[in-house]
Image (tube, rainbow, N blue to C red):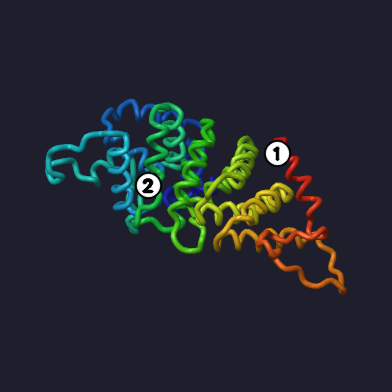
Amino acid sequence: MRSARDGGRFGVDFAGWLDQAMHAVTDRAGEVGRQVATVRTAPERALLLAAAVFGEARADTVYEAWHGLMRTVGHEEETTTELARTDFGERLATLGIERDLEGRLHFGRLAYADAVRTYFWANFPGTRDDLRNWIGHAAGLRGLTTDDRVNVVVRFGERSLAVGRPDHLFDLVVRWADHATGASCDPRAMAALELGLSHERFGGWFRRRTYECARSGPLSDGLVRVLTAACLQSLGATHPDQAMVQLHYLAVRKGEAARGAREVLLDLAGRDRRPRSSEAPPSPHTAAGEPFLSRDLGTRRLRTANSAQQRR
């Protein structure tokens, strides 16, 4: 009921909030099923899904995402001019989608967008590969804010994990990271990977996948940065031994991103270190350019964790 109250779109009294909250937890799935059964054309269904995934984004951006979805699933564009078709506002109203004063789109019913996403991922399994490819592109649309992008990633990730497709989420982690520019992590890739690593059912799958990735052949700087950040922010807190192992593999690579991995590795290893007044500060590199890990920085711990990781 708090969502109904705080959303500001469901009245101003307790009765209105309670009504929306009760509907949200009882019959949203049935409502969506009935609506999809009456919405028979591909453009209408695509708009319903686009609004559910890109909800709270600006209408023009949702419009762009909608057309991108239709192209991705292979729907042929109408041959008539847009001026001769049903206008966008009428299409939204017909589907129960509202445009607020700031031009952002919302469903008129609480929790309806989540029910729409759940319905499509559960009942149109043949489109899941297309939906992954659609999100891979559409989550980068220029009209999206960083918060919008992260919201889209989380919504896609939740549905992909719910239907047992963690590979779809990790595919996008790699795709977004590989195309990142500059020295910062792509927020979409980070959000997707953190969601996977923290997932109750698939967290172990993501830990194994990131380990395999860290050990593999050439990696883009963008992916090295994302994996390093995940070790620091996620694995470092929940599975520190595994974080050390993965960082070791990332740190021995060449390039600026690998240097960042070395710094994070030394930082994590140094957290368990007991300071010695007579000890000189360690160098981060040996003469051969390999990461320096003295005994008190956790060499024994690293070897033990590495063996355990390989057995998983």
**Looking at numbered disc 1 in the image, what kind of residue is underneath it?**
Gln
Residue 130 in the image: above or below residue 5? above
Residue 37 in the image: above or below residue 216? above
Q: Observer-nearest residue: 68 or 287?
A: 287
Q: Quadrant of residue 46?
A: top left
Kindly report the distance in space between the C-alpha atoms of the residues bearing marks 2 and 1. Answer: 35 Å
Q: Earlier in the sequence, mark 2 or mark 1?
A: 2
Rate crowding at label 1 as few (under 14), some (14 to 19) or many (20 or more) other CA atoms within 10 Å. Answer: few
**Quarter in which the N terminus is drawn:** top right
Q: Observer-nearest residue: 84 or 294?
A: 294
From the viewer's perspective, tell me whether residue 62 is left or right of residue 186. Answer: left
SS for dot 1 = helix
Q: Circle 1 sits on which residue?
A: 310
From the viewer's perspective, tell me whether residue 42 is left or right of residue 276. Answer: left
Q: Which x, y percent locates residue 112?
A: 43, 39
Q: Observer-nearest residue: 44 or 29?
A: 44
Q: Which x, y percent locates residue 136?
A: 41, 45
Rate crowding at label 2 as few (under 14), some (14 to 19) or many (20 or more) other CA atoms within 10 Å. Answer: some
Residue at 20%, 38% in the rendered image: 77
Q: Circle 2 sits on which residue?
A: 137
Residue at 23%, 43% in the rendered image: 90
**Quarter in which the C terminus is drawn:** top right
Residue at 43%, 40% in the rendered image: 113
Q: Which x, y percent locates residue 182?
A: 46, 63
